[in-house]
Image: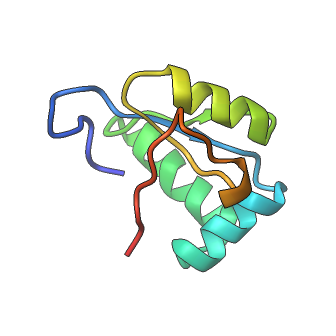
Amino acid sequence: MRLRTWPDGTKIRVFVLSDEDDLHQTVSKERLNVFPYQLRSQWDRLVYSGTGQAPTKVNSVEEMLAKVANTPGAIGYLWRTDINENVSILQIK
């Protein structure tokens, strides 16, 4: 949440689904170890303190794929079955 640019200098653009979306809940709970409302609260704190920018909310997995594939510096999340050659995979450890 604190990084603003990728190592090559490209601005990071974060895309998320709504808190109610099954994929968003899975990513939040299983990969980030927080509930969706906790993640949103962390983003809100950064935005209201002036130290961060809110992620862009998308309405569907299809829109997420399109935004990540066509926006320089974009990062988001998809089900493995929705990934195609237009996006790169980053591993979360």
Whether 78 is drawn above or below 85: the answer is below
Q: Is residue 82 left or right of residue 85?
A: right
Camera-nearest residue between 4 and 71: 71
**Residue drawn where x is 54% and y is 38% of the image:** 85
Count the numbered circles shown. 0
In percent of width and height, residue 34 lies at: 58, 74
Q: How are the colours assigned in the image?
A: rainbow
Whether 31 is drawn above or below 57: the answer is below
Q: Is residue 55 left or right of residue 58?
A: left
In percent of width and height, residue 62 lies at: 77, 34
- Residue at the front extreme, as displayed: 85
In percent of width and height, residue 55 lies at: 54, 37
Whether 58 is drawn above or below 90: the answer is above
The quadrant where residue 31 appears: bottom right
In percent of width and height, residue 25 lies at: 73, 66
**Residue drawn where x is 29% and y is 27% of the image:** 11
**Residue drawn where x is 45% and y is 52% of the image:** 89
Camera-nearest residue between 5 and 82: 82
Which quadrant is home to the C terminus?
Answer: bottom left
Q: Is residue 10 left or right of residue 67?
A: left
Q: Is residue 50 left or right of residue 58?
A: left
